Amino acid sequence: MQIVHAIAALGLIALFFGLFLSVAARYFAVETDPRVEAIKEIVPGANCGACGYAGCANFAEAVVRGEIQPGGCIPGGEETAKAIAEELGMEVVESEPVVATVFCIGDKNKAVDSFIYDGVKDCAVADKFNGGFKACTYGCLGLGNCERVCPFDAIEMGSHGLPVVDEELCTGCGLCVGACPRVLIKTLPRRSEQGHLVLCSSQDRGKSVSKVCSVGCIACRACVKACPQEAIEMDGKLAVIDLNKCNDCGKCVPVCPPGTIYPRNAMPKESNQENEAVEKTAVSGESG
Amino acid sequence: MERVLSIIFIYILVENFVLHRFFGICPFLGVSRKMETAVGMSMAVVFVMTMATLVTWLLYSFVLIPYNLEYLQIVTFILVIASLVQLVEITLRKISPTLYQGLGIFLPLITTNCAIMAVALLAVREEFTLVEAVVFGVAASLGFSLALILMAGIRERLEMAKLPEALEGSAITLITAGILSLAFLGFSGMLSL
């Protein structure tokens, strides 16, 4: 008799809770659009936020609502855009694949520090602290905010203290662009990585640049004059190469006194020359 | 009345479920990284623990004892707790999807939060009356919330602090938990039932 009681009691309790839960589930049901579920399956699911939404699920909802184009998922690329568009019965607006590029080559050995920074290992914090520990106020602080924000492990801080972008892993999501407090990273169209670039972001006068960094653009305009395509223009105190005009002739490379210009298919990876930094005493007066 | 008041103080401070009895350590370490999720988790636990104590007490007194089925108490209690957690999950998903996502796996894991089972079992073992049992449930869950929120506050500050590399992450969290527990040891013996 005891066993009957036990089974009946537990069975009835379970039945009661089951019914109660099913009523609750009906009452609190969350309606989801089946298309949202389908798109969630299509997108990469890295929740990188490159589309401007908090995660892939939010992106899927936004696409269904029509707030963003299917091509808005940058890491997903063309294939994802097509698959989403197919799901929604839309036409694809193609977007060009891009790759992140760091516009600073003033590594530990080439650019000097104005003081020793021993604070939080975060570029944004270091940048706010007394103008940053690097004597060049435009250069990379090398504390790796871009490395940490990259959802695809495409950025690694090299031993020379600068980020190195793995072009194969980079999806061009652009998160690192926003993560860099000094806006040193730009996304450029891939187009089989053609053209040359001036790898510096400094807007300082030539004299101030050469004091703090041996490879910064000194705004000498030698490259502007040397370029047969007229692809190089001065943006303030910085030479900028227009990738649409550049034909990879390479005439700007040898004329650049600090050697700031590199072809995109042979970007500097890690420096092996030591002690190239300019004399530390040159800036000790400014550091205060 | 006096007994009810002492139950409240004993289970919030003196015999804090997390810091004195070491129940519910998993969510205590798991969701204490951010204040927002810690508060959400606390509210969910307060609800589940109070309801669980109420329902399990009623079931134990009016179903299990009359039919001599006391040996089924753990099975029954698990059933009650799991159902309540499901209810919280369904409700939260509708009411606050952000909190639902923030709590993540720790929400369904309230089911296996031993603090809740402990409250249900202790309420029966201590032979509390219905009112005392419910107060016990509320007090224990508030104690849990207190520990969790204290921990979240400390951890949010530790996030920006400069730590020796070897202590970063879970190491400093466990050390902090230990110091908190030691601090609560100071309350021991102040009150008893």
Image (cartoon, grey):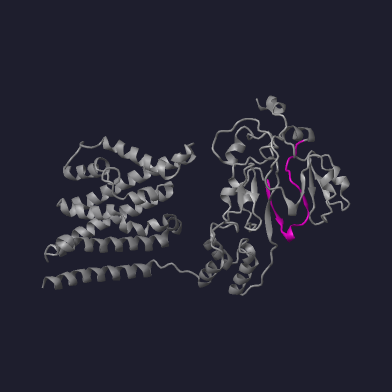
Residue A199 on the magenta segment: yes
Quarter where residue A116 is shown? top right
The C terminus of chain A lies in quadrant: top right
Asked if residue B15 lies left or right of residue A156, the reply is left
Q: Nearer the viewer, residue A117 or B32?
A: A117
Which residue is depicted at the point 78% across and 33% down? A207
Identify the image quadrant of the N terminus of chain A.
bottom left
Query: Where A203 falls versus B123 (above or below)?
Result: above
Q: Residue at x 30, y 62 (%)?
A: B82
Question: From the viewer's perspective, is residue B8 above or below residue B45?
Answer: above
User: Which percent across, then down, holds residue B176?
Assistant: 37, 39
Q: Position of residue A203 (x, y in %)?
A: 75, 39
Instruction: Assess whether residue A136 is covered by the magenta stretch.
Output: no
Count up the numbered dots.
0
The span picked out in magenta is A184-204
B45 or A193: nearer the eye?
A193
Residue B149: name its quadrant.
top left
At 79% across and 47% down in the image, what residue appears?
A: A240
Horizontal side of B145 relative to B75 (left or right) equals right
Residue B24 horizontal/vertical position (percent): 31, 50
Whether residue B153 appears in this view of the structure is no
Relative to B13, is A69 on the left or the right? right
Image vertical order of residue B57 relative to residue A80, above or below: above
Q: Kindly tell me whether residue A59 is visible in this rendering.
A: yes
